[in-house]
Image: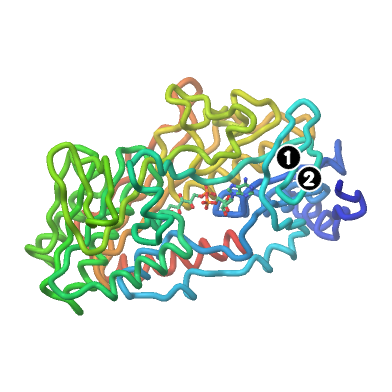
């Protein structure tokens, strides 16, 4: 089955409006097709800005999930601060931008004919393709994880959704005096501060509801990877004696029968096990050979356009990109805008901005009323990649103001991505 050309959207009234307001438009190729794969933070934002800045474009956004479930704030659900409903949103708001949303997954890409195929057999052609699939969880990086996960005994909850809800239920069912183990993979992984925020918010829940319980953090890294002063301050002042942090402790084996996580040195028993395996670029990137960094894990791109260095015409944004930039939702939306602007320019035979500026802000809650943040602005410097301006930085202690900002940040970015 191939897509009927009539299914694609025609130039909308927004085109005239955008042109009148001086926005980028697409005179050279008014019907060029751009397909975006993945409607997470990066993909949904990219599709939206492609239509805003290239209102003549046919933009198709392909996503298997019916609803958007946000990883940001998902740790708040685990801590009992928010519900799954609070982090689950519909895609309906994207329709007003004239994006064609296809509920499906991409299973094959032919870069020569610039055609892709979905799981349900739809064939879709494109002039430019954007891959924004997030991360693939490498279940086989921890022996026994796949079986334990399939049995519903051990989850990563590193993609928000059913596993988030299951982990919360496991924490609720855990007896007071039990042990919660969180195993952190070696960097790079999605959301560097996320595991430490999770430890804080589960500790908050235990402090209120199961005060004799403990948290054991098995970190594959030699030290706390992000916002160390914020988290160590929270652990010592808010949760003294509750969090047992063990660096250089990669989880090698998980055994759901004995509820044990094994490292090189010890077998650690817990009542609830949260094992986060290693990660790499989403599997769909491999269909075009784009996982091409030294470890064949992440995708190298031209940072001015986010075009893959391995697959011409294919752009990659968000967590899948090989870089030292943090893998965050905020960063994914910034990359989405650079990529969308560059595609609009390229399709109009204009040179894209050679030195784009992007930013990252990431809040982490440390309790039900305190949070801290990290914020940086980056400019692309040819030959050097994105270089952070020296003014950025991180808070060293959580406070109530940052907690309020964290909540507003989440509401703003959900609106930015989905409406
Ligand atoms: P995603 O948002 O994961 O979107 C990828 C989409 O692609 C998914 O919807 C998926 O279904 C789809 N997809 C995959 N393969 C295919 C295919 N073959 N065909 C079609 N669709 C496909 N970031 C922040 O900025 N702030 C935070 O506070 C924050 N907190 C976090 C807390 C936790 C616990 C975690 C795990 C992450 C957190 N993050 C946070 C990180 C943030 O969630 C990610 O960096 C962000 O989601 C990356 O965006 P993305 O578009 O690359 O991927």
> Where is 411 relative to 141, above or below?
below
In the rendered image of this protein, does residue 84 appear above or below residue 388?
A: below
Helix, strand or loop status at disc 2: loop
Q: In the drawing, does residue 245 fall left or right of residue 49?
A: left
Looking at the image, the residue that sits furthest to the bottom is 209
Locate residue 204, reporting x and y percent: 22, 71
Of 24 and 373, the residue lying toward us:
373
Q: Is residue 252 left or right of residue 63?
A: left
Residue picked out by circle 2: 25
Query: Mark on residue 182?
Result: none
Nearest the eye: 312 or 258 = 258
**Dot 2: few (<14), some (14–19), or many (≥20) neighbours within 10 Å?**
many
Look at the picture and state if 395 lies above or below 294: below
Q: Earlier in the sequence, mark 2 or mark 1?
A: 2
What is the C-alpha distance between the residues marked 2 and 1?
7 Å
Residue beneath the point at 20% across and 67% down: 203
Whether residue 112 sits left or right of residue 39 in the image: it is right
Residue 406 picture quarter = bottom left
Q: Residue at x 62, y 69 (%)?
A: 90
The residue indicated by pointer 1 is: 344
Residue plotted at (81% across, 39% down): 125
Work out whether residue 43 or residue 335 is closer to the camera in this orientation and state it: 43
| 377 on left or right of 253 | right
Report x, y in % for residue 374. Answer: 32, 51
Q: Residue furthest front?
A: 257
Residue drawn at x 26%, y 63% as measured from the top left: 272
Q: Position of residue 123 (x, y in %)?
A: 81, 43
Pointers 2 and 1 in contact (C-beta within 8 Å): yes
Image depth: mark 2 or mark 1 in front: 1
């Amino acid at each position: 089955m191939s897509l009927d050309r009539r299914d694609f959207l025609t130039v909308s009234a927004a085109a005239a409006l955008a042109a009148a307001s001086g926005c980028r438009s697409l005179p050279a190729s008014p019907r060029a097709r751009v397909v975006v794969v993945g409607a997470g933070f990066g993909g949904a934002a990219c599709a939206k800005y492609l239509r805003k800045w290239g209102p003549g474009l046919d933009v198709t956004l392909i996503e298997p999930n019916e609803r958007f479930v946000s990883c940001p704030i998902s740790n708040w659900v685990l801590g009992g601060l928010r519900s799954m409903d609070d982090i689950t949103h519909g895609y309906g708001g994207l329709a007003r931008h004239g994006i064609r949303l296809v509920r499906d997954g991409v299973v094959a890409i032919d870069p020569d004919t610039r055609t892709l195929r979905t799981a349900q057999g739809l064939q879709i052609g494109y002039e430019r393709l954007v891959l924004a699939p997030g991360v693939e969880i490498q279940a086989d990086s921890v022996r026994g994880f796949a079986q334990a996960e399939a049995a519903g005994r051990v989850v990563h909850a590193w993609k928000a959704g059913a596993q988030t809800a299951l982990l919360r239920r496991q924490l609720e069912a855990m007896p007071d005096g039990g042990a919660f183990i969180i195993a952190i993979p070696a960097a790079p992984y999605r959301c560097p501060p996320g595991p430490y925020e999770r430890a804080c918010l589960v500790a908050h829940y235990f402090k209120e509801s199961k005060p004799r319980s403990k948290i054991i953090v098995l970190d594959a890294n030699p030290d706390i990877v992000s916002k160390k002063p914020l988290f160590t301050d929270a652990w010592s002042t808010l949760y003294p004696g509750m969090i047992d942090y063990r660096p250089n402790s990669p989880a090698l084996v998980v055994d759901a029968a004995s509820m044990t996580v094994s490292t090189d040195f010890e077998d650690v028993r817990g009542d609830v096990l949260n094992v986060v395996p290693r990660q790499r670029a989403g599997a769909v990137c491999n269909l075009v050979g784009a996982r091409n960094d030294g470890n064949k894990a992440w995708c190298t791109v031209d940072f001015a356009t986010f075009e893959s260095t391995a697959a011409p015409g294919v752009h990659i944004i968000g967590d899948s990109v090989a870089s030292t930039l943090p893998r965050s939702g905020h960063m994914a939306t910034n990359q989405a805008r650079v990529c969308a602007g560059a595609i609009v320019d390229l399709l109009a035979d204009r040179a894209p901005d050679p030195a784009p500026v992007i930013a990252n802000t990431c809040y982490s809650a440390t309790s039900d009323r305190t949070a801290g943040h990290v914020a940086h602005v980056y400019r692309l410097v040819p030959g050097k990649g994105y270089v952070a301006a020296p003014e950025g930085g991180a808070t060293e202690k959580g406070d109530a103001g940052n907690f309020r900002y964290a909540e507003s940040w989440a509401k703003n970015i959900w609106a930015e991505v989905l409406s």
